[in-house]
Image (cartoon, rainbow, N blue to C red):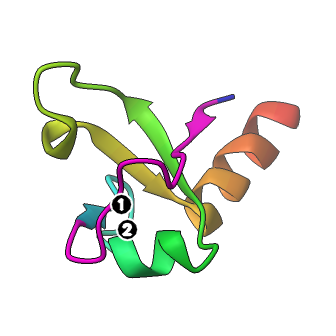
């Protein structure tokens, strides 16, 4: 299972693009409770990490469970 992004350090103007479907989740949405999952974390530049939205993460976890 991938780790969920913590709102700590997130600013409202940030954007997290899902690597699977391309949906953009804004930093404001994360601050308001939206979930974004870290697929691959870039320690040098967090904005260059690979993300997955909650819907795609749920589908990915269901496929693993089959």
Q: Quadrant of the C terminus?
A: top right
In this view, 56 is above or below 32: above
Residue 25 seen in this snapshot: no
Q: Which residues are magenta?
A: 2-14
In this view, 61 is above or below 33: above
Magenta stretch: includes residue 49: no
Residue 10: mark: none
Residue under the image location 45 percent in, 38 percent down:
38
How far is the residue under mark 1 from the one under mark 2? 6 Å
Residue 44 image offset from top left, x and y in percent: 11, 21
Is residue 14 rendered to the left or right of residue 3?
left
**Viewer-nearest residue: 57 or 37:** 37
Residue 63 image offset from top left, x and y in percent: 74, 42
In this view, 55 is above or below 9: below
Q: Main secondary structure of the magenta part?
A: loop
Q: Quadrant of the N terminus?
A: top right
Residue 21 image offset from top left, x and y in percent: 37, 68
At mark 2, the secondary structure is: loop
For label 1, the crowd category at 10 Å Cα-Cα, with few meaning under 14, some 14 to 19 and many 20 or more, is many
At mark 1, the secondary structure is: loop
Q: Quadrant of residue 22?
A: bottom left
Residue under the image location 50 percent in, 55 percent down:
7
Which residue, given by chain and number where applicable, does mark 1 sit on?
18
Residue 21: mark: 2
Is residue 16 rendered to the left or right of residue 37?
left
Q: Nearer the viewer, mark 1 or mark 2?
A: 1
**Viewer-nearest residue: 36 or 28:** 28
Identity of the residue furthest to the top in this view: 43
Residue under the image location 45 percent in, 52 percent down:
52
């Amino acid at each position: 299972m991938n780790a969920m992004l913590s709102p700590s350090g997130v600013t409202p103007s940030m954007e997290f693009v899902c690597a699977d479907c391309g949906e953009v989740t804004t930093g404001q949405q994360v601050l308001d409770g939206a979930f974004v999952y870290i697929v691959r974390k870039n320690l040098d530049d967090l904005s260059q990490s690979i993300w997955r939205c909650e819907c795609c993460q749920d589908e990915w976890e269901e496929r693993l469970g089959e």
